[in-house]
Structures are given as C-alpha cells and as structure tokens.
Image: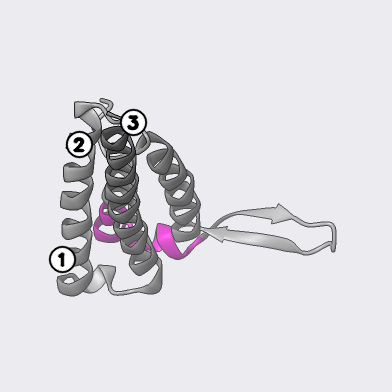
Amino acid sequence: MASFPLLAIVVFLYSAFALTAPGWLEAVQFSLPLLSGNGLPFRGGDVLLVLGLVLLCVEVYRATSSSKGAVLNHVLSLVVFIIALIELLVMRQMANMTFFLIMLMTASDVIAGFTVTISSSRRDWQRE
C-alpha cells in the first residue's frame, strides 16, 4: 500500500464519473458559506480538484522516504501521469480544464518525487 500512488484515486474517480455520470461533475454538490454572505459553490469536479491537492501534498511528503517502496511509488506515479495524459489527449470527456489540472497534479507528483529522491540520495551519498 505504501507504493500505491494516491493521485490514481482522483484520476480513476474523475474518469468513472466522466464516463458514467458526467452531470455529477458539473452539478453543484454543496456551497461553502462565506463571511461576505455569499456561498462558494463546489461542483463535483471542484471536489475532485480539492481532493487531488490534498493527496498531492501527501505524495510530496511520502516522496521524502528513500525506501524501495518509494521508488516503486515514483514509477507507478509516472504510469498514472501517462494514463492521465493519454486520457486528456484522446477522450472527449476528459478534454476540459478540470481534468487538465488533475493531469498537472500527476505531473507535479512525478517531478517532485524524482527530485526529492535524487536530492536526498545525493546528500546521503556525499556523507559517506
């Protein structure tokens, strides 16, 4: 479980909703009341974006580990990014800004994971 890329959950959920219940992604799911008296509406796609940002933070934290599971996580994160990129380019239901931002999150996960791992391993190697 430690090597499972968490952003795969968001890519899977968005894909599933886009293919089976596209109306959910566009419909307002709830509204967050603000002090101004207005409400901040959250559509289904917005909810998935927020979930993706939270999971991206967790993934960046997990990237600081230098275990064998972390390397597998980076490879699987790269696979998730490639799948998301292909979906964006090929599938009509994914050709929107919300999924584009989710795909960018997967790219950020890959870049952050490899960068953190390389810099921490370089630091460990210099100490020896």
Q: Which mark is residue 71?
A: 2
Quarter where residue 68 is shown: top left
Q: Nearer the viewer, residue 127 or 90?
A: 127
Q: Is residue 122 above or below residue 102?
A: above
Label located before the other in sequence (2 or 3): 3
Query: Is residue 12 positioned above or below 86 on the image?
Result: above
Q: Magenta stretch?
A: 15-27
The amino acid pointed to by label 3 is Ser
In the shown orientation, is residue 95 left or right of residue 86? Answer: right
Q: Element at badge 3?
A: loop
Q: Is residue 61 on the magenta stretch? A: no
- Callout 2–callout 1 Cβ contact below 8 Å: no
Going by the numbered disc 1, the residue's amino acid type is Ile
Residue 86 at x, y percent in the picture: 15, 66
Report helix, strand or loop for mark 2.
Answer: helix
Locate residue 69 relative to residue 65 in the image: left or right.
left
Side (left or right) of 55 relative to 17: right
Q: Quadrant of the C terminus?
A: top left
What secondary structure characterizes most of the magenta part? helix
Q: Which residue is mark 3?
A: 65
* Point 14% across, 72% down: residue: 90
Q: How many residues crowd mark 3 within 10 Å: few (<14), some (14–19), many (20+)? A: some
The amino acid pointed to by label 2 is Val
Q: CA distance from mark 2 to mark 1?
A: 23 Å
Quadrant of residue 18 within the rendered picture: bottom left
Q: Eyeballing the image, is 62 above or below 1? A: below
